[in-house]
Image (cartoon, grey):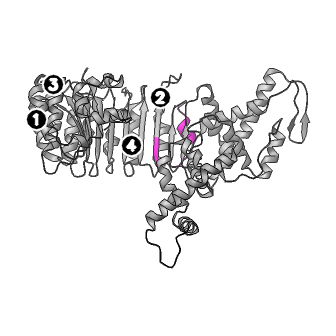
Amino acid sequence: MIRRLQLIKKPSIDFSQKKLTKLFFKHPTKNVETTDAFYNSVASFFFPTECLLKVFHYLENDIVSLHSCLLVNRLWCKAAVHFLWAEPFAHDPISISIVTVLLSCLENSKKLKLETILQRVPEIQSKPIFQYDKLIKQISISYFYCAVKKWVEHTQKLKSSYAITIGNSMSRGPLKRASRESINKMMIKSVFHILCQLLFTPETSIQSLSFNYVGENTAPAYNMFLDKEFNHNMNFNHIRHLYIDIILECTIFPRLLNFIISVESLELCHTHNWPLSDFSHIDEGFSKFMANQKNLKDFRLLASHKFPSETLSSFATRADSLVSVEICGINFPKMYSAEPTLEGLALCKNLEDLAMVHCVSLSERDLMPLRNASFPRLRRIKFVACFMGYDHVMVNLIKNNPTHLQEIYYIRQMTTCIPVTQESKSNSDLSIIEAVSRYSPQVIVLGVPLTVDQIPCLVEILTSPKCQIRSLSICEGESNSISIAVNEIWPTLGRTMPKTLLHLNIWTQINNTAMKRFFHNMKYRDRLKTLYIKQWAKRIDDGSVPDALREYFRDKIRSSEASKFFRHVI
């Protein structure tokens, strides 16, 4: 096996080093003989670990290739290890081998402490090759806890009797089932605590901390890690990203506030059927937590439950720092506040990215602050599956903040809509596509609902000298369907597709003949990187490609990259 690795390894090393050296060092001096030794020396000079790290970014998610790179040489091994250990539980959430490796990184005093806690001390490597604990950048507390629990259960199989040291005394005797479970929990907590102390130090590289849903182990992992006595000697000043997959209780934010104070990105997700579904008292702790995150820039809230609308007023405390806000799938019932729901969000003057997806129960009055908001740096607006009241919000955001707008994406919820008053109609005479044409024709991402009478506005944008559109999504408006006039519309649109277009998404009905004429007139269709047609998506997934696509994208269909081409990309 070793000989086989050597035979495979050596030619690949020489070839890669020579090839890269010749690429960056084409003309060596005449006095230097271009031998293997020369190329090896130059390669070692020109390709330090920092350069390889940039190259290895292309292999970041290719675990098999990264493991192969470990066998090339010392330099490649060092570079690959950085990526393999950046997020150790991403590919194997409950790997006991990761726990074993981390235990080998402990100081001798900690290893001796383990011997007094564990019934059986497995063989642990005395000195690891790398400081693996310093390579970790992202870690899930829940997965980490589950891995420790599995490691303890695998290595510590309790017998009918057990000896345990408590202080300076040792107790022995038969174990009942309850006692075994108690000792097992004690060992899990002790090992978990020792390893957390190893990871969360002032020298740590961990910048991302997450709490994932792991079934019955979720609550023990939460409660143990958030306990003051458990984490009081740990350092969390390097944490920049916090992800919470499930909100167990309303006190989670006051408990997090004890040690998390420098978050730049906060992501909250609650889509699991957890017994606690009433968040009516979460707003006070959440507001205090938000107020203390002085560097908070990105906020994302995703939930499938009712969430108190008053919670969003806490955006006002971070109005000077928030840059990106995404709210997805929230049902906002009115609680007790008389203030508009989005008043705090409207105060975020530095906002660059605003996304609202599947948000219901927001009245026109709640949306009013956004209609009047001024975001001078706004670059991206995304409203998906929203109600008709959002049309007027979108139009006003475009009118009030056109300078830096690059992405405008709007997909309406067609099933129902909130009441729209006559006053709001008079205040917003423009449609979204008309507002884009008048105020922001330079956008690079455009997705809007269209009616037949709005097609000229789209044509004007696509044929403008300022047109830079890379992604275009076309869907139908609420009336005067463009699918009725496909024979007249699609050939014209095909001729107007810009040279810059890379991603095309069609959400409206279109027949085979109209699509053939559309692509026949599309001059730069070969430049497309992705294509999505909603009514044909299932047929394409099943391997049945329509004739219109087969005729004009034959090369894409024949290649192995067809699945990457026929997909939805904004």
Identify the residue position indicated by label 3 in the image.
513
Q: Residues within 10 Å of mark 3 (few under 14, many from 20)?
A: few
Give the residue type that dot 4 points to.
Answer: Phe
The mark closer to the camera, 3 or 4, is 3
Upstream in sequence: badge 2 or badge 1 = 2
The mark closer to the camera, 1 or 3, is 3
Residue 395 drawn above or below residue 9? above
Q: Residues within 10 Å of mark 2 (few under 14, many from 20)?
A: some
Give the residue type that dot 3 points to.
Answer: Thr
Give the residue type that dot 2 points to.
Answer: Phe
The quadrant in which the C terminus is found is: top left
Q: Which mark is residue 424?
A: none
Place of residue 42 in the rendered image (x, y in percent of width and height, measured from the top left): 53, 68
Residue drawn 37% across the image and 45% down it: 324
- What's drawn in magenta, residue-wise? 250-266
Identify the residue position indicated by label 1 in the image.
492
SS type, badge 1: helix
Residue drawn 77% across the image and 44% down it: 124
Q: Is residue 501 visible?
A: yes
The mark closer to the camera, 3 or 2, is 3
How far is mark 3 from mark 4, CA to CA? Answer: 51 Å
How far is mark 1 from mark 3, CA to CA? Answer: 14 Å
Identify the residue position indicated by label 4 in the image.
315
